Image (cartoon, grey):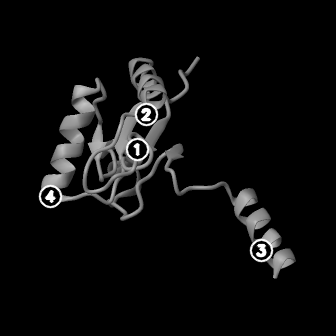
């Protein structure tokens, strides 16, 4: 029997892995960090998915390492995804996206409907 592929998890940094105080680094979200580290131990692949770049990105990656969190990719698709699709699309491919600014489609529609009712 074929083993099920472990998920790819893309996670944001500011406001997600740590409290948002950009360009600084806020307090760690210890619960999320523990969960992600456990997922990684169980075979999930992790992608740090952030707007940070340059020196600020390096600081974030090093900070994550000090928290015990290692990534399979940073602001990039995994090699297996690049090979599967024959390109490296700008959108990061993941099974789970964790971001403080994200919402599921149903929540976006409910928000819009509530906005229209208020207006």
Please state, as top left, top right, bottom left or bottom right, where the N terminus lies in the image: top right
The numbered mark at residue 87 is none
Question: Residue 90, position in %: x, y?
Answer: 36, 65
Disc 2 or 3, which lies upstream in sequence?
Answer: 2
- Calculate the distance from the C-alpha at mark 3 to the C-alpha at mark 4: 38 Å
Q: Residue at x 25, y 50 (%)?
A: 24
Disc 4 or 1, which lies upstream in sequence?
Answer: 1
Tag 1, which secondary structure? loop
Disc 3 marks which residue? Answer: 115
Q: Nearer the viewer, residue 86 or 92?
A: 92
Disc 4 marks which residue? Answer: 54
- Calculate the distance from the C-alpha at mark 1 to the C-alpha at mark 2: 7 Å
Q: Is residue 80 left or right of residue 8?
A: left
Disc 2 marks which residue? Answer: 29
- Calculate the distance from the C-alpha at mark 2 to the C-alpha at mark 3: 31 Å
Contact (Cβ within 8 Å) of mark 2 with mark 3: no
Q: Is residue 32 left or right of residue 67?
A: right
Tag 3, which secondary structure? helix
Density class for disc 4 (Cα within 10 Å; few <14, some 14-19, many ≥20) is: few
Question: Residue 107, position in %: x, y?
Answer: 73, 58
Contact (Cβ within 8 Å) of mark 1 with mark 2: yes
Density class for disc 3 (Cα within 10 Å; few <14, some 14-19, many ≥20) is: few
Disc 4 or 2, which lies upstream in sequence?
Answer: 2
Tag 4, which secondary structure? helix
Contact (Cβ within 8 Å) of mark 3 with mark 4: no
Q: Nearer the viewer, mark 3 or mark 4?
A: 3
Figure quadrant of residue 92: bottom left
Density class for disc 1 (Cα within 10 Å; few <14, some 14-19, many ≥20) is: some
């Amino acid at each position: 029997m074929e083993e099920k592929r472990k998920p790819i998890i893309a996670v944001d940094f500011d406001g997600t892995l740590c409290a948002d105080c950009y360009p600084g680094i806020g307090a760690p979200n210890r619960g999320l960090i523990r969960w992600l580290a456990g997922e990684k131990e169980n075979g999930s692949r992790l992608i740090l998915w952030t707007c940070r770049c340059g020196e600020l990105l390096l600081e974030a990656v090093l900070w994550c390492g000090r928290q015990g969190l290692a990534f399979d990719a940073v602001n990039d698709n995994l090699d297996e995804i690049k090979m599967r699709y024959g390109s490296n699309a700008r959108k990061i491919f993941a099974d789970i996206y964790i971001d403080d600014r994200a919402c599921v489609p149903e929540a976006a529609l409910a928000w819009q409907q509530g906005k229209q009712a208020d207006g």
